[in-house]
Image (tube, rainbow, N blue to C red):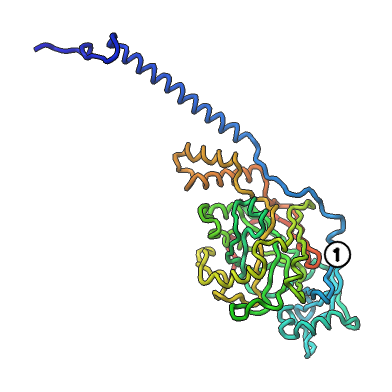
Amino acid sequence: MTSTTTNDIPVSGTGNPGSFGRRHRKDLLIAGIATAGLVLGGLGSYGVLRWIPPEFPLVYSETIEPGATEEVMLADPAIALTFARVATATGPAVLAVTDYSGGEITGIVVTGATGAAHTDPITAFNALGYDTLHGIATDASQPTMTVAASAVLTAIETHKHHVGTGTNYVEHQEETTIHEPYLFPKMGAITDSNEPLAAGVGGLLDYEVELGLVAMNDITAETGIPEYMGLLLTNDWTDRELLVSQIEPDNLTDAAGFTNAKSQPGFFSTGDLFVIPADWQTYYRELELDLFVNGDLRQRAHPVDMVWDPVTLIEQTLAIGDRTWDSDGVQTPLTAAPGVISRGTIIQSGTPEGVIYRAPDTRQRVLGFMEYVASFGTNADSIVDSALKVYVRDAHEAGAYLQPGDMIVTRAEGLGQIFTDIVAGERAETEDLN
């Protein structure tokens, strides 16, 4: 038998049988160098992107006028009635407000036929009617009470099941990349106009100035759009880190996570005044709502520019049926009774541009993609989630969100003011809804 060595194996295309091994090693070397170059280039690009500071742009460059918060221009009683709630020796009382100046609120105590003071303007309205309240508010012979604006109570007494609205201004749609409005349950107690807010430990605390529409009586499809609605200045605080951890990027208008991220204790600040216009569908159109952080203007809302106007918001709320959202593990309908906007329900009508949050920018999306690929998809559920994690990391490193010591002033002529001091401390993870 004749033995055969490897040198006897023919090699196609070459007269030198050993050249195949040399060429293969050369190809591997070139591939290795190219791969190393790509890796080094990728690492270099990643390093450059990480080195570039993130941007958290501001919309406005205005500052609050000196002394602006000392007074609020009130509506002529012929156009709208203005109320505040104050503490007295016998309990809460309602003032028909006649003046707001020098940091003080002056008004006439609203009493019924028995002389007993009403404790809530919605109750007073339903007991006395608009015309009687107008007569009280314009009776110059009535004695008045003056209190510090900082001492008033919440402007109304109400329950803890309300309605939130997302991306209801076009410019806010652009900064969040959510291009249609949506609704969600807003759970929790309202707080007064001077209640401090704990920054919390972790999380990203954001502000949202919003016009609150308040049901004076139950609203249903059968009752139709009411003749009277109350108006209230509100701030819809948000933990953005919690929100981006729970949203569904492929279905943002489903509003998953919004109830939890916007319903922590203290996340429903309300103004010092409650307004009942004679013609509410006209009155809200003239309002301008401003929000300042440490004296700098961050948001300016013109409710006339809402995508869904208040009538549409009411109709959408009634039409949503028995759909539910997660609220701290409990499936919760939009309103306590589907198809009913109960008396005292506040519909927060959405915020304009100027919040701290922005959808991840190009840099953050690229970093998110690179980190997702480098981790073989183990760092996040998707590339979008990875980009959101980069955004959250950037926000923490930049200290871009609200911090202890920040003072937020929210105000609107003809509507009222809110002063929120951000203080150090933890917040409870859930709101007590009992």
Q: Residue at x 85, y 59 (%)?
A: 68
- Label 1: element kind: loop
373 and 320: which is toward the camera: 320
Q: Residue at x 53, y 59 (%)?
A: 256
Spot occupied by residue 244 in the image (x, y as percentages of width and height): 56, 52
Q: Residue furthest left?
A: 1
Spot occupied by residue 324 in the image (x, y as percentages of width and height): 51, 67
State whether residue 10 is above or below residue 430: above
Residue 286, quarter of the rendered image: bottom right
Q: In which quadrant will I find the N terminus?
A: top left
227 and 243: which is toward the camera: 227
Residue 170, quarter of the rendered image: bottom right
Q: Residue at x 78, y 75 (%)?
A: 87
* 323 left or right, relative to 406: left
* Circle 1 Cα neighbour tier, 10 Å, few/some/many (<14 / 14–19 / ≥20): some
Residue 275, quarter of the rendered image: bottom right
91 and 280: which is toward the camera: 280
The residue pinned by badge 1 equals: 71
